[in-house]
Amino acid sequence: MKDTDKWPAPGKRTLERKRRLGPLRAAIASTFWEYTERTKVSGMWLLRRQRTHGLSRFIWSSVLLQLLLLSIYLTLLLWLKFYSYPILNTISNDLSITDVAFPGVTICSPKVVNTERVERYVKTLNIPPEYAMADVAAGFEFLNAFTDQSFEPPTHESYRVTDAVLRLNNVSVWEAAMAVSPGCSDYVKRCFWGHTEFQCNQSHEYLSFIPTTAYLGPCCSFNYNPRNSSYVPFSANIFGMDGGLTFVGAEGSERNLNTGLIVLVHHPMDYVTESASSVTITARSESFLEVSPTVQSSSAEVLELSERKRDCLISDDLRLRNYRQAACMLSCQTEAIVAKCGCHPYLLPIVGNQFKECNLNDTFCYSANYDNFKSVRCDQCLPNCYDVTYSTLSYKTDLNQHQFSVSRYYSQELLNRDSFVLRVYLAKQVVPVIRKVTVMSLIGLLSDLGGIFNLCLGLSMISVVEFFYYCIYRLYVNYQLQKAQLPRKAWQ
């Protein structure tokens, strides 16, 4: 015989469910009517028991529901604007040129290896009898692989001989490249800052040209010293054509040198890459290079955002003394080269002693992967939150055609057939500032949210508190009252 008392009959289960849900339903209804009677929210008073009935209550309830949905939709749009597009760029002209570093000026020759310099340099090396001097000289041609995208390796293998001789003489590839390439003594003859002349190659912290390297190979730079980690670039207090840097140079003092020169203007703390502004200068010309700095900065509110949201980095984010995006990109590129070829090209700044310098034998690996190295993606290298970029406007006059120069340094005696005059100066006394500011702060977001809900439903902050008060506390109190009345109802 089945135990009928173990499981309640279906009718009994339904009664028990109603007995459990009855107090909750009654509490919800009681709380709702209480809320409509006491709340100050616009429109809710029309839902009171004695106020509207039937169709009018249905229509008014529909209107309130639609306005609620509209406020939710507008809130989502506002949140997406706050979260996805939090930054706005503003432009102002309120920064003096004295607050901005004068740009670095780098002069390079598109021809890395100078034949006459190679012939002279080879004679200074200790060459064993089993090696021919001509083979040692021919091996320097492989230096072009580090700078020429279209480099085709020669059929001979003189690079092996040259590598062996350089190791025997304890000479690095960087030292050899600087010796066989055109240098500061070839490019720069007389130098002036404003109207004051200074020695071009003097040992001075700022006013001097020093040998450097760029993506074009060995170069000569002003206001740029990558081998001095504590170097601080200087700022100019003069502007216009009569201010800034002026120098008289030579396109080529040797037969094999006159191929034109490339002048690059860049940030004085950054290695010179293809992104730098450049202009080509030729002999018997006076070139004017007008530089216009632009400052990018960020407000304190922007710096409080996450790194990805503000899309920039500061030194404190990485706990570095001085973060530069260009240095980060360069380090990333160097790591890719080391991973593929196992060495560090001579023309890139020295990162540390952990990487060996590429020799001439490594040029095959480097030239084969040249395009891949130049297109390495470094997503972790975000822009600087504070940075200065330099745009240029250049024009030149032909000294042969006009026989006249605005420079007082021009004379037939000072300039020969290979000479040129270059003037690099700041265009204006003030610098435009592109400042990142937040489109909306957290306080602004709360204010706009309040405006939306006040527009649609007439809600204020106290109304929201009141709503949760009734939904939580008053609902709980009414539920307890309904439960307390259950035994009394059952007894009746």
Image (cartoon, rainbow, N blue to C red):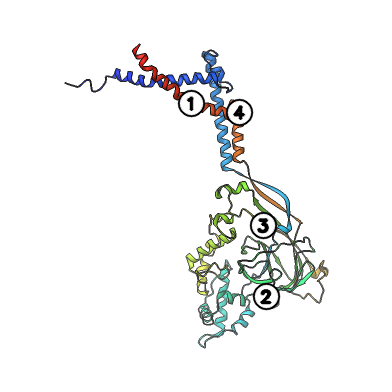
Write the residue at 51% across / 65% down: 337
The mark that comes first in sequence, 4 or 2, is 2
User: Of the residues tagged 2 and 3, which is closer to the observer?
Assistant: 3
Q: Which amino acid type corresponds to the residue marked 3 in the rendered image?
A: Thr
Secondary element type, mark 2: loop
Task: Name the residue at 66% across, 74% down.
Answer: 183
Assess whether mark 3 and mark 2 are in contact (beta carbons under 8 angstroms): no
What amino acid is at disc 4?
Answer: Asn
Q: Residues within 10 Å of mark 1 (few under 14, many from 20)?
A: some
Residue 279 in the figure: left or right of residue 29 = right
Q: What type is the residue that disc 1 sits on?
A: Cys
Residue at label 3?
389
Q: Where is residue 280 in the image (x, y as percent from the top left)?
A: 70, 66
- Residue designated by label 1: 471
Q: Residue 257 carries which label?
A: 2
Q: Marks 2 and 3, how far apart in space? A: 31 Å
Task: Pick whichever of labels 1 and 4 is earlier in the sequence.
Answer: 4
User: In the picture, which quadrant includes the C terminus?
Assistant: top left
Q: Give the mark toward the camera: 1 or 4.
A: 1
How much space separates mark 1 and mark 4, taking CA atoms? 20 Å
Would you place residue 490 above or below residue 67 in this image?
A: above
Q: Residue at the top extreme?
A: 492
Closer to the N terminus: mark 2 or mark 3? Answer: 2
Which sits earlier in the primary sequence, circle 2 or circle 1?
A: 2
Gap between marks 2 and 1, in whole Å?
86 Å
Q: Residue at position x 66%, y 77% from top?
A: 256
Circles 3 and 4: CB distance less than 8 Å? Answer: no
Q: Are the two marked residues, 1 and 4, in contact with CB atoms closer than 8 angstroms?
A: no
Measuring 63% from the left and 48% from the top, which residue is drawn there? Answer: 300
